[in-house]
């Protein structure tokens, strides 16, 4: 066997004769390093390249073999190196102690060369198998992580594509999607510490809320342009048609779910948000007139986020309100339009809401593009 392919053994013993004996026994099959003390053994074991196996004497002055083994197992660089204890101690409890510390075997002195060689070879083969399985596990873990990132990216792109489709037919801008996403996330994170919401607002669910929020108005793709793009107030008949976008949104997402063939958490939340974000705390909202805790938490968060953004945002047919005026309307709606605790969270987060609005502010070009689209659609 060439030197490059030979395994490396570290022999640790404070007696020169023992080191010479073990070195002579092993040198024809393995590369052999030696250490005559515990501290030196730890240093050699942690150096690159690491030994493949350690033969460790127990009875050494200063730092004994047990302490060396503890140090090896405590260091991530050396904890997976198999340790075989070499000792003249024959008491059963000393063997149990060594194995409990993480040693793989125990050879008593005086040694039998064939036994030493056989056990060393056996444990090197076991280490190869363990290394292979560990490397495979690391590879599989990284592959799962990579594929999960790919799936997440596909989900995100699909959501944004669907949301952007709705946005092209609406007077809202693409930044409305970003702002409401961020508002919902801020509210959810703030309310996670509230006992009323803590069971539903763990970090994973908050991430899903953020992911699903852009689909809140996906149903608007089914509303006729003559109503959706109308710059003035709706007639009662037009408003009834407009209200159907909640059910249309849920149906569109359900259709996507059926095509996928399996339930997906963020789509379940997206359905809640699309269908119920126009419900009001006092039961006067639509489409079902739900009230109080019967309204899904996700929809309660989106209800406030959506109304706040509508109030402060400039549209082709109106100017946006200053934050203070919009905040006053939101807080006045606590207990009627909005869950009181959600409104209280908004009150505490007013500076953050203002920062989000500023970070994703609409550009003048957005308004010009929307006005041109309205003019084109109305034939002017």
Image (spheres, rainbow, N blue to C red):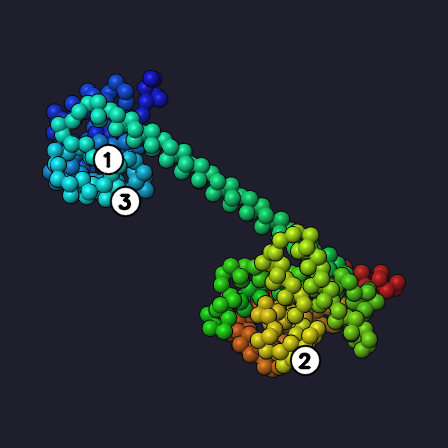
Disc 1 designates what residue?
105
Disc 3 designates what residue?
74
Tag 1 secondary structure:
strand
Q: Quadrant of the C terminus?
A: bottom right
Give the residue drawn at x 27%, y 44%: 74
- Rendered location of residue 327, percent (x, y): 60, 76
Disc 2 designates what residue?
284
Give the residue drawn at x 34%, y 29%: 125
Q: How crowded is the residue under tag 3: few (<14 C-alpha within 10 Å), some, or many (20+)? A: few
Tag 2 secondary structure:
loop
Q: How crowded is the residue under tag 2: few (<14 C-alpha within 10 Å), some, or many (20+)? A: some
Which of the pair 193/144 is nearer the observer?
Answer: 144
Query: Across the whole image, how many numbered discs are drawn on residues?
Result: 3
Task: Give me the C-alpha separation between circle 2 and circle 1.
Answer: 75 Å
Tag 3 secondary structure:
helix
Give the residue drawn at x 48%, y 69%: 198
Residue 364 seen = no
- Rendered location of residue 13, percent (x, y): 16, 31
């Amino acid at each position: 066997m060439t030197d490059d392919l030979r395994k490396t053994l570290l022999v640790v013993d404070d007696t020169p004769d023992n080191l010479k004996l073990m070195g002579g026994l092993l040198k024809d099959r393995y590369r052999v390093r030696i250490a005559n003390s515990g501290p030196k053994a730890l240093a050699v074991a942690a150096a690159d390249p690491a030994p493949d196996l350690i033969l460790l004497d127990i009875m050494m002055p200063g730092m004994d073999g047990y302490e060396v083994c503890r140090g090896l197992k405590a260091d991530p660089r050396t904890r997976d190196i198999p340790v075989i204890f070499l000792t003249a101690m024959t008491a059963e409890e000393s063997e149990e102690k060594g194995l409990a510390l993480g040693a793989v075997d125990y050879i008593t002195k005086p040694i039998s060369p064939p036994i030493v060689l056989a056990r060393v070879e056996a444990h090197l083969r076991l280490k190869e198998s363990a290394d292979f399985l560990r490397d495979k596990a690391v590879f599989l873990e990284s592959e799962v992580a990579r594929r999960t990132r790919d799936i997440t990216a596909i989900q995100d792109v699909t959501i944004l594509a669907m949301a952007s489709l709705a946005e092209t037919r609406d007077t809202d801008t693409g930044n409305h999607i970003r702002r409401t996403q961020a508002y919902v996330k801020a509210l959810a994170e703030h309310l996670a510490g509230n006992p009323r919401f803590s069971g539903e607002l763990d970090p994973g669910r908050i991430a899903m809320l953020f992911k699903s929020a852009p689909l809140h108005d996906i149903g608007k793709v089914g509303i006729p342009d003559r109503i959706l793009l109308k710059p003035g107030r709706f007639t009662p008949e037009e408003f009834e048609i407009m209200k159907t976008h909640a059910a249309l949104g849920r149906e569109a997402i359900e259709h996507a779910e059926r095509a996928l063939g399996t339930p997906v958490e963020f789509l379940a939340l997206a359905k809640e948000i699309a269908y119920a974000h126009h419900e009001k705390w006092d039961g006067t909202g639509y489409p079902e007139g739900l009230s109080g805790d019967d309204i899904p938490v996700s929809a309660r968060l989106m209800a406030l986020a959506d109304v706040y953004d509508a109030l402060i945002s400039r549209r082709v047919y109106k100017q946006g309100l200053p934050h203070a005026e919009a905040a006053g309307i939101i807080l006045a709606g606590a207990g009627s339009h909005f869950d009181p605790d959600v409104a209280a969270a908004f009150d505490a987060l007013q500076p953050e809401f203002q920062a989000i609005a500023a970070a994703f502010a609409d550009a003048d070009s957005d308004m010009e593009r929307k006005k041109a689209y309205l003019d084109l659609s109305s034939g002017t």
